[in-house]
Image: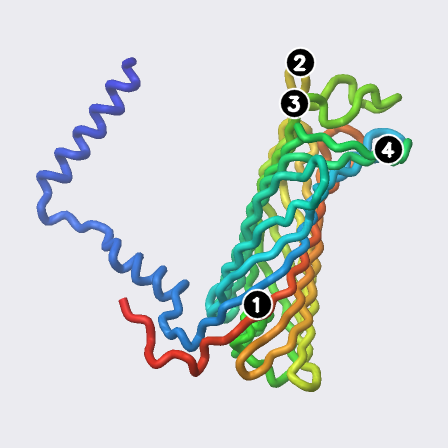
Amino acid sequence: MRKMIFIFGLMLHGCNTIAGQEDSKFIDLSKTTKFIDTLLIDRDLNNWSIRALSSFKQQQFIIRPKDNRYTYRPNNPYGIGFGVGTKKVILDISFNLKASEENPTERYDILWSFFKKNHLVDFYFQRYKGFEVTNAATGETLFREDIRSLSTAIRYMYMFHEADYSIASMKTGLVTADKTTFSLGLGGFILHNTQSADESIIPIPTDGSILTEPVEKFQGTGVGVMMGFSSLIVLPHNFFLSLNAAPGIGLMSKYVTTDEAGYQPKQPVIHQLGLSMILGYNAEQYYINLAISNGYYTTDYNIGDDVIFGYLNAKLAFGYKLKGKVKRNWKK
């Protein structure tokens, strides 16, 4: 109670001080808004495209206790959607296609990319409920509707070679490359991952595993650095190919919740690797590209070998450019 009174007093004093200083200088939020607006929004509709897409998304994790291996993957990875692309930002929205299975996975995915000159930012958010669990020792597969997974991350990469076009901008179909380029980059990442279930995520008993009680949840938040290699190869007849790799290493704060209590793993190291490929065709009024990204990160939760978190995303996009179809820019 004393702490609350003290904090309230400080807030009241601060308000009185601000009210009594009419000449005080404040942060001009309009300038900040204008900067963000310039950074993200392209007001020339000739630099926009609309997109239809189909997708394949597979977010899985693998737990390897002693002498066994459990693979957890969703069972309905296909989707369709639409999006918009500018020379600054791509925003795609897809809807999962639930197969005629008795127990489809409930899932929610967001992927956002931003790029400008040397800077590349990627963000994703994935929330799944319901996984197929495969036991490598017995070959048995069963569906666990109580298993939930939440994964989110933001990655930033600074590419040392600045060009009039980038790998990310080629996805929009609004930029045409005329020469092959290679570039190195340096950046970092922040990620969070949580897996939970109503019962033990790992079947009990585990026959000799160091795991001695049910694991109902394990989670971690990590930060790290990564290096990047990016290549854009111009092919004949308006085709192009992009190959990219980004290995990284970092530290993660983790916690495992068991049936009785829980513990914090001592090993904080996390390894990550991202791989991607784009094959595209860019015509005058439309474009087609196939983008595939595959990556994983591993870390130790003291339940056997490192837990592996992997993803595979594939997207086939058909875009139509608004170039030449609009008379003027979009005004405020």
Q: Determine which residue is flagged by label 1.
A: 168
Instruction: Tell me the mark number nearer the camera, choosing from 3 and 1.
Output: 3
Instruction: Tell me the mark number nearer the camera, choosing from 2 and 3.
Output: 3
Secondary structure, mark 2, is loop
Task: Name which residue type carries label 4.
Answer: Glu
Crowd rating for badge 1 (residues with CA inside 10 Å; few <14, some 14–19, many 20+): many
Q: Determine which residue is flagged by label 4.
A: 140
Residue 116 at x, y percent in the picture: 48, 68
Instruction: Tell me the mark number nearer the camera, choosing from 2 and 4.
Output: 4
Q: Earlier in the sequence, mark 1 or mark 2?
A: 1
Q: Quadrant of the C terminus?
A: bottom left
Secondary structure, mark 3, is loop
> Alpha carbon of mark 3 to alpha carbon of mark 1: how far?
40 Å
- Looking at the image, is 332 positioned above or below residue 325? above
> Alpha carbon of mark 1 to alpha carbon of mark 2: how far?
47 Å
Q: Earlier in the sequence, mark 1 or mark 4?
A: 4
Q: Determine which residue is flagged by label 3.
A: 198
Which residue is pictured at 83% across the width and 19% down the height? Answer: 205
- Looking at the image, is 284 positioned above or below residue 99? below
The reply to whether the C-beta atoms of the residues labelled 2 and 4 are less than 8 Å apart is no
Q: Earlier in the sequence, mark 4 or mark 3?
A: 4
Marking on residue 260: 2
Q: Earlier in the sequence, mark 2 or mark 4?
A: 4
> Alpha carbon of mark 2 to alpha carbon of mark 4: how far?
28 Å
Secondary structure, mark 1, is helix
* Figure quadrant of residue 39: bottom left
In front of the other: 217 or 91? 91
Q: Does the rendering let one see residue 60?
A: no
In front of the other: 55 or 178? 55
Which residue is pictured at 26% across the width and 54% down the height? Answer: 29
Task: Name which residue type carries label 2.
Answer: Glu
